[in-house]
Image (tube, helix red, strand yellow):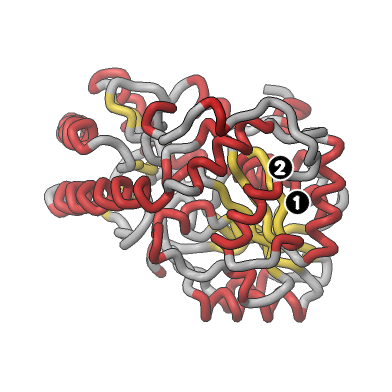
Amino acid sequence: MSEDERVVASEYMHWAKTQSGARFNLAVSGMPNLKLQELDVSLSDLEITTQFPYGYPPLKQALAKRMGVDEDCLVTAAGTTFANHLAMAALINPGDEILIEQPTYEPLLALTRYLGATARRFPRRFEDGFQVDLNELERSLSPKTRLVVITNLHNPTGVLTNQDTMKRIGNLAKNAGSRVLVDEVYLETFFDQRPPTAFQVGLEFVITSSLTKAFGLSGLRCGWIVAEPELARRMSRLNDLFASTPVHAGERLSVVAMKQLDRLSTKAGDLLQRNRGLVNRFLDTRSELEAVRPEFGTIVFPRLKHGNADEFCDLLKDKYETSVVPGRFFEMEEHFRLGFAVDSETLVAGLERVGQALDER
């Protein structure tokens, strides 16, 4: 791959789209995709064309209510990844410095390169339970830092950053003349117990999220950004260069889905609770692995005590028809990310094969 291709592409997203598929796919990080018939929807709920080029008001109102913010603080976007793109494109200029957690979601690094910014890193360590070390973050800030970027729940580990820590992160960033971008898409897996958004802490925060991970609604591309009103307007206008107008049928379906989230949440929450127990019991039996075990979310990030995870992941897929995400995509080659938001039968079968691959090493 040439230097130019590395600048404009996400290595992880290409792998996820072309190489992650397997009979037992534990590389996924969101709930199984819903079929249309699983939503209570009729043709009368839909329309093709919109007269609202900056977002369908019923959808913006529903999302603003869910996030507990004023509607003028909310911008709709085509999923969380694009929400991150739109937010970062509005917040930084070529040559700016961005402070990003390590490990992190690889497209955030690819996007930083694409926007011509420089990525500076602060570590989140296994030995600290992958929690944010505020002293490390403060040491890593510089006068050039324009944006701090974190994920919450943390991707790839599923670890929660609490509101008090977020407040302290915001204070450090504000004192340095920086903003904080928080990708909160996995917080949706708290369902009706969702913690308050970090935007409630201060206006230095910009939040991105979507319905993709928690509800099996990835195909709707219902994402959003929360920011102070003037910044939200800037992002909305910048989107003129990317999306022109929203896909209105998707907006309409998203409104329908928003009205049914209570029902979808119950089903998804029950599945994740059951599957988290299956994963924890599996980890109890495998001395070859050590893991920070998150209490929430859809993912876990085990570490092999010996050996390289790439070789293990290749063996697991090629011989045992099971896929997980190699840790190299998160800059930690001894780890792999395992997703458990799949039907329980698939998870049990996949974990059995993970065990067989571990035995063979």
Amino acid at circle 2: Leu
Quadrant for the C terminus, please. Answer: top left
Kindly identify the residue that appears in the image at 37 percent across and 32 percent down: 38
The answer to whether any part of residue 311 appears in the image is no
Query: Does 98 sit above or below residue 244?
Result: below
Q: Which residue is farthest front?
A: 44
Q: Sort mark 2 into few (<14), some (14-19) or many (20+) by Cα contacts within 10 Å.
A: many
Judged left or right of residue 114, residue 102 is left
Q: Are marks 1 and 2 in contact (CB under 8 Å)?
A: yes
Kindly identify the residue that appears in the image at 57 percent across and 26 percent down: 14
Task: Pick the residue in front: 166 or 358.
Answer: 166
Query: Does 197 sit above or below residue 151?
Result: below
Kindly identify the residue that appears in the image at 17 percent across and 31 percent down: 349
Q: Quadrant of residue 166?
A: bottom right
Kindly identify the residue that appears in the image at 19 percent across and 53 percent down: 277
Judged left or right of residue 33, residue 150 is right
> Pointer 2: what residue?
111
Measuring from the top left, give residue 325's x and y in whole percent: 41, 36
Alpha-carbon distance for marks 1 and 2?
8 Å
Which element is circle 2 on?
A: helix
> Pointer 1: what residue?
88
